[in-house]
Amino acid sequence: MRAAVLEEYGEPLRIEEVERPQPADAGVVVRVEACGICRSDWHAWKGHGEWADDQVPRGQILGHEPAGEVVAVGDGVDDFEVGERVAVPFSLGDASCPECRTGHGNVCEDGYALGFEPDAPGAFAEYVHVPEADYNLAHLPDEVSYEAAAALGCRFMTAFHALTAQVDVGAGDWVAVHGCGGLGLSAVQIARSRGANVVAVDLDDEKLERARDQGAVETVNAGEVDAAEAIREVSGKGAHVSVDAVGTAAACRASVESLRQRGTHVQVGLTTEAEKGEVSLPTDYMTRHELSFVGSRGMPPTSYDALFRLIASGDVDPEALVTREVALDDVPDRLAAMDEYETAGVEVVTEF
């Protein structure tokens, strides 16, 4: 099968012929119909993460936002059959650890990150293997397209988990979203669906306009004004919840400083080589105002039903975030375009 393989950090991925996966006893093989191109793929391609012992090894097939059709099923799989449409999470649980058993498979003690480690080859490929399929896979409703499922495969589900589980955004809350890429726009949609007043922050006016289209009531260009001050002014006292969907030191600090008393900062963006996983924060200020700092990673596979119900309600539309459909051969160039934040919304591979 054809796949996009990381051979050297920062060098174009190579499109190669590799062996097609076979299902493990508890696994299935999925023919990939769509796979999103995420900034986390860019981090992996650039070789980031060494500072957290999380660097993706050379030789890895990248891609972690797939949806497709089951084509092979292991003998130990009960809930899935050949021909079924499925969505695949990037955070794969082992189905047996305490975190998985209590509904937190996204932080499984012995899980896999699809597309980021040798035991879980990714989905920039014609086929992808999914371990512990009965736990990790989700049946994809007929009304949800493969493209929409790819759009929710990492960024949308991450925003959903962050704003509904890690914090409970409610009607009337002020929510600031720093960064209007695919993850940030997903957060805008989800916060809006819960009745929140969303303030979107970015350096690009076109991305801010897209955020307005997705439900932001106010926008702030952080290159022109102090973002934290602008958010405090427009919201009256500051945001109840502020999301860093970028991962830069400037965005993280602005997010924290934009909060009102007892507000909550949610970190979903990963840092770059400039920060190396470390950001300086005003801890005395955070203590004085009883601010909370919460991390959020992906979404437990067990939350798919709730996410699909939200999509079915019509209150959110992940497919509306898809701005471009590309071929597997285009992936190297689309990752390179992320160097200068030249991509918009969610780009999806649909031709393999």
Image: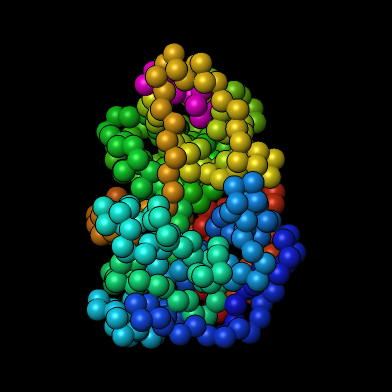
Q: Is residue 37 above or below residue 130?
A: above
| Residues rendered magenta in the picture | 254-262
Q: Position of residue 315 (x, y in %)?
A: 29, 50
Q: In the rendered image, which quarter contains the N terminus?
A: bottom right
Q: Is residue 165 above or below residue 109?
A: above
Q: Quadrant of residue 2?
A: bottom right
User: Is 81 placed left or right of 253 in the picture?
Assistant: left
Tell me, yes or no, if residue 220 can be seen here: no
Q: Give whichever of 89, 26 is nearer the camera.
A: 26
| Residue 190 horizontal side relative to residue 267, left or right | left
Location of residue 287 in the rendering, given as x and y in whole percent from the top left corner: 45, 17
Q: Is residue 166 left or right of residue 65?
A: left
Point 60% across, 77% down: residue: 3
Q: Looking at the image, what colour scheme do you see?
A: rainbow
**In the image, what residue occupies the spot 24% across and 79% down?**
78
Left/right placement of residue 57 relative to residue 106 reads right
- Identify the residue at image location x=27%, y=33%: 171
Name the image quarter holding residue 54. Answer: bottom right
